[in-house]
Image (cartoon, helix red, strand yellow):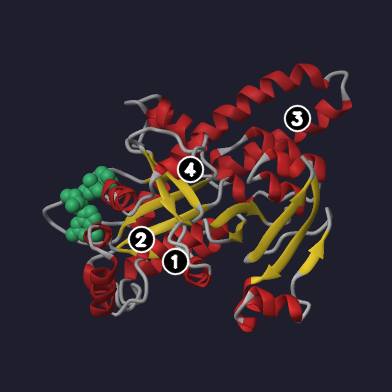
Amino acid sequence: MKLGIVGLPNVGKSTLFNSLTKAGAESANYPFCTIDPNVGVVTVPDKRLDVLGEMYHTKKIIPAAIEFVDIAGLVKGASKGEGLGNQFLANIREVDAIVHVVRCFEDSNIVHVDGSIDPLRDIETINLELIFSDLEILERRIAKTVKLSRNDKAAAKELELLNRIKAHLEENKMAKTFETDDEEEREWMAGYNLLTAKPVIFAANVAEDDLADDGANNTKVAAVREYAKREQCEVFVICAQIEQEIAELEDEEKKMFLEDLGLEESGLEKLIKASYHLLGLISYLTAGEPEVRAWTITKGTKAPQAAGKIHSDFERGFIRAEVVSYADLMACKTYAAAREKGLVRLEGKDYVVQDGDIMLFRFNV
Ligand code: GDP
């Protein structure tokens, strides 16, 4: 799963990305991850793993991870191929969701490309580039479909859909807010992989003073929140500069530093968790003496496919799964006690795995 960090120059993207990668994971544990300086692997904070680690007397804890891609250089005119614009847009097309950093902090030493601090204007600037790029895709698709539509009913229906989405975007609206109840239309639309259809989290980058009350007194943050609500996006208040400092601290120091700021967890941790949820991801857990580990699945995944995340043999030879929920295990304190109480269930191939399920798979080789 990949998230792309976008935003105008000088809003704090690299600062945020650096703190993410500093806090980042040992990529050896995550073979799916790309080796690229613009990609950072970040572990998903999950306190349950530490608790299980103690219970099973293991030091080896492997959290879930997601990738963040620093997509710098998205500027006004990118969709017209200015600068390396098109290349950046292509990078965005490959991510599952977007973290859009907007500047809400004042600092006269750091110039803003458009001269003043106005997050809504910044959002509009970036969104327009994304919309232009999507329009180009739609137009190409329309040109192809027009010919087919003359003697193909499905193509005619698709052409009509394409024109409707196009009209929506031409009103400067994101594809995300385009609505259709038609299953076939939804599938077509997913196939276009439109940039403006991707989930968005706004990271409102504020000054340190605005952290304690989560930006409540910052009118610029309020404007972003209002906008995000309308556009069905989430907002997180962060201070990239502080995050960078926090990322360099050891765990104990970090806790004290956060307490001083009046915070329970860093903005980064909140952002990472929110991204995970936004993507519809959950974790099931495996626990034993050798290691305690979180495995990422999308909500609704059934037991054999979940097992396949560990090894394809587990999926192919799946017989059943032994499952106890994290909450039940905690309530009983030991696996044996949970089993005695009948809380360790045997589940078959149709079982839909839940977040926090502790799983043991039985399979044929
Ligand atoms: P990018 O161009 O969006 O990647 O922006 P950078 O991360 O390079 O940040 C631009 C400048 O703003 C750098 O000098 C950062 O140190 C500074 N900066 C980033 N975040 C903050 C912040 O939260 N507060 C303040 N005052 N400065 C920041």
Disc 2 to disc 4, C-alpha distance? 29 Å
Q: Name the image quarter holding residue 327.
A: bottom right
Q: Name the image quarter holding residue 236.
A: bottom left
Circle 1 packing at 10 Å, graded few (<14), some (14-19), many (20+), is: some
Mark 2 or 4, closer to the camera: 4
- Identity, as a three-letter code, of the amino acid under mark 4: Tyr
- Identity, as a three-letter code, of the amino acid under mark 2: Ala
Circle 4 packing at 10 Å, graded few (<14), some (14-19), many (20+), is: some
Q: Earlier in the sequence, mark 1 or mark 3?
A: 3
Q: Are marks 1 and 2 in contact (CB under 8 Å)?
A: yes
State whether residue 55 is above or below residue 186. below
Q: Residue at x 77, y 16 (%)?
A: 147
Q: Residue at x 80, y 18 (%)?
A: 148
Label 2 sits on residue? 204
Task: Give left or right: position of 268 versus 11.
Answer: right
Please state the horizontal and vertical placement of residue 166, each as a whole percent of the image.
63, 36
- Identity, as a three-letter code, of the amino acid under mark 3: Leu
Instruction: Label 1: state its secondary structure.
Output: helix
State whether residue 171 is above or below residue 210. above
For the N terminus, which image quadrant?
top right
Label 1 sits on residue? 225
Instruction: Label 3: state its secondary structure.
Output: helix
